[in-house]
Image (cartoon, grey):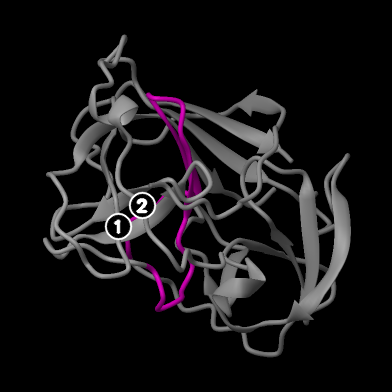
């Protein structure tokens, strides 16, 4: 049985910029969670999926939801939000000026600074054109010194996966792998363990997809899945 947790979706407009150091990666710039509390097993369709283009390089999209003045980019909706805390450089940011804050339920893992030092504009996800105006007085600009991980990913089987942001109530599995991204409204998960979350040794990035369970049940080994598009956050 699959238990569904509803997440958000949307679309962006792109412009091309220079590619990063990974060979063959196409980069575009976009003008621009509450964790699951139940679990699911991987679907038969995903387990039997055959990638029609396994060597196609992963496309990298850098999302920029504000202009150079820190105001919302064109066509973005802005709603009032909440007070957030523990704001630090976002782990999905490719440069300075993008923060991630807690609590996870505020969906403030990607936030852009504004002309007001206490006000942040936070994105619901890389596929939406909506922002939340949150406030904070806890900002630490110390660099994370770690490889940025995608804000969201589109996989070869068509799944859209949003990055986990805090929270201690995600389900688990007996082999110790953890959920890092929730895909397709909580039906499946991108998993992480001792190995790097995204295998970027080739132009076509790979991740492992599998199920999770509230009782840490045993599952078959996860499925290797190509990342078609990886979304990061960038400053204007």
Pick the residue in front: 236 or 39. Answer: 39
Residue 148 in view (yes/no) = no
Mark 1 — residue? 212
66, above or below 194, in the image: above
Q: Are marks 1 and 2 in contact (CB under 8 Å)?
A: yes
Residue 140 in view (yes/no) = yes
Q: Residue at x 38, y 26 (%)?
A: 58
Mark 2 — residue? 40
Q: CA distance from mark 1 to mark 2?
A: 6 Å
Question: Is the magenta region chiefly helix, strand or loop?
Answer: loop
Q: For label 2, count other residues whose C-alpha is less than 10 Å away and answer few (under 14), some (14-19) or many (20+).
A: some
Residue 166 location, x and y as percent? 46, 74
Magenta span includes 150: yes
90, above or below 118, in the image: above
Horizontally, is 68 left or right of 51 in the view? right
Pick the residue in front: 172 or 206. Answer: 172
Magenta stretch in the rendered image: 146-170
Horizontally, is 115 left or right of 213 in the view? right
Magenta span includes 45: no
């Amino acid at each position: 049985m699959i238990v569904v947790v509803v997440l958000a979706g949307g679309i962006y407009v792109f412009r091309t910029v220079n590619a990063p150091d990974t060979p063959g990666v196409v980069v575009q710039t976009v003008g621009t969670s509450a964790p699951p509390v139940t679990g699911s097993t991987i679907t038969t369709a995903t387990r039997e999926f055959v990638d029609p283009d396994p060597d196609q390089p992963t496309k990298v999209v850098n999302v920029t939801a504000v202009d150079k003045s820190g105001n919302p980019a064109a066509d973005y909706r802005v709603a009032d939000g909440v007070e957030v805390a523990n704001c630090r450089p976002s782990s999905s940011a490719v440069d300075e000026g993008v923060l991630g804050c807690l609590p996870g339920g505020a969906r403030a893992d990607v936030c852009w600074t504004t002309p007001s030092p206490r006000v942040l504009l936070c994105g619901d996800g890389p596929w939406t054109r909506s922002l939340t105006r949150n406030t904070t007085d806890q900002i630490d600009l110390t660099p994370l010194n770690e490889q940025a991980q995608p804000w969201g990913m589109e996989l070869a089987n068509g799944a859209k996966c949003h990055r986990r942001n805090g929270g201690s109530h995600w389900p688990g599995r007996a082999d110790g792998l953890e959920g890092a991204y929730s895909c397709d409204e909580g039906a499946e998960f991108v998993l992480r363990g001792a190995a790097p979350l995204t295998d970027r040794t080739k132009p076509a990035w790979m991740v492992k997809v599998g199920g999770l369970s509230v009782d840490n049940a045993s599952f078959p080994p996860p499925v290797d899945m190509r990342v078609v598009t990886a979304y990061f956050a960038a400053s204007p």
